[in-house]
Image (spheres, grey):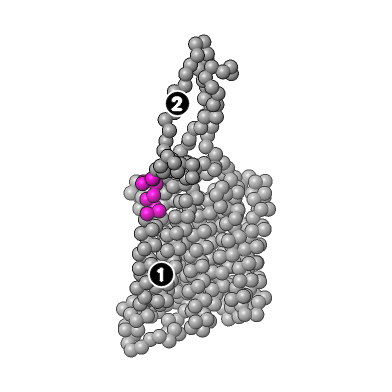
Amino acid sequence: MRDYLLTLCVTAAVTYLLTGPVRKFAIATGAMPEIRARDVHREPTPRLGGIAMFFGLCAGLLVADHLQNLNSVFELSNEPRALLSGAALIWLIGVLDDKFELDALIKLGAQMISAGVMVVQGLTILWLPIPGVGVVSLTQWQGTLLTVALVVLTINAVNFVDGLDGLAAGMVCIAATAFFLYAYRLWYGYTIEAAAPATLFTVILMGMCLGFLPHNMHPARIFMGDSGSMLIGLILAASAISITGQVDPDTLKIFEGSTRQATHAALPVFIPLLLPLTIIAIPMADLILAIVRRTWKGQSPFAADRGHLHHRLLEIGHSHSRAVLIMYFWSALIAFGTLAYSVHSTSMWIVLGITVLSAVGLVLLLLPRFTPRAPRWAESFVPPRYRRRKLPAVPTTVAGAAPEERVPVPTGINGATAIGNRSRFTDRRKAGTPS
């Protein structure tokens, strides 16, 4: 565990320290696109944050290769090299897109090629544990198609959810933490060496996200761009592929009786294996809803709009920071709830806890619909949104005085809401005073 902590800290430190110079480089090269209709921020913000994240990935792999307890991952498996090859290709395409705005089909092709590069080097799905059937071996073509599909879906799911400051990095960090705990349990709990690569991938992914988040929290000083979102999406997919298709369920040594009975008995343990996409359930749901919504309107599935889940939270009335925290909450509830159930499926306390937390999440989600108003005596102790609105005083005019002019001031990026322009009046001169 100490080696993993060291790898995590080095990856986070390199990512954090390089993000500042990368921001200056992005500004110097003009990687600051104009504000688009679907954007939430109000000021041009540099992208290319994925450059710092990629070098953090390289630093994490380099450090792990020189640690005694983690060096065996590179000696016994070719998966780290496969990951680095696919990550380098998708990162390069992302950097070009952040600068020159590549076509969506070009990026889709690059995602498929990156997945193919990993498949050629051995990072692919070999078999699947299916409830009621048992372990099903896949042919080479079946494994390749399933691997490419999983990589493309995960990359685009993370890319779609990257719409608010700190949202994608935080959600992927939560998913990586849950994946790390499960993979670490397989490796040291069941002594399964095949789970070691996924454990390393997830801890490096955690370090990349943690190192970038201080620069990306609201108000963000830099965006990760497609170079970062596609990169972390590919690493998350690689971790899921390594756990799902490389770990033989027979090595868990929990089978008793027939294969069918054993699979049913071991189903809670196989939940993260069978359904790795539950770790990124929120981004995947956003991706599916976006495709259905755009296709229903006769638009391209790659056409941008303002109908994502985080946009709807802002429309309900949540502030930018609170919308991000709500998305964090639901991601953590699904990821860690699935992880806890896979470990202790017979405990009713886990089910009860998930139910209670889900109810709390629904209350927080609908809170702006039922905003309470504090009594008069408590208004000085609560935020302004909970105070009673005061009627504006009717200004009195003096004969011969010019009418008062009010100059609207547009909302900055630190406003309470991120959708819609609000006008504030800074000219508060008394009526009748000379201008």
Secondary structure predominantly adopted by residues drawn in magenta: helix
Q: Is residue 33 magenta?
A: no
Q: Which disc, if any, is residue 338?
A: 1
* Identity of the residue drawn at 41% across and 62% down: 281
Q: What separation in Å lies between label 2 and label 1 (alpha carbons)?
A: 56 Å
Q: Which disc, if any, is residue 360?
A: none
Q: Position of residue 193 (x, y in %)?
A: 53, 81
- Between tags 2 and 1, which lies in front? 2
Q: For the C terminus, give its image quadrant.
A: top right
* Identity of the residue drawn at 45% across and 81% down: 248
Q: How crowded is mark 2: few (under 14 residues within 10 Å), some or many (20 or more)?
A: few
Q: Tag 1, which secondary structure?
A: helix
Residue ranking furthest to the top: 400
Query: In the image, is residue 183 above or below residue 34?
Result: below
* Identity of the residue drawn at 42% across and 81% down: 249
Query: In the image, is residue 101 above or below residue 154?
Result: above
Q: Give the range drawn in magenta.
A: 363-372
Query: In the image, is residue 97 above or below residue 272?
Result: above
Does the rendering let one see residue 280?
no
The residue lying toward the viewer, choosing from 307 and 413, is 413
Residue ranking furthest to the front: 377
Does the rendering let one see residue 381?
yes
Q: Which disc, if any, is residue 393?
A: 2
Question: Type of residue at label 1?
Answer: Thr
Quick one: label 2 or label 1, which is nearer the N terminus? 1
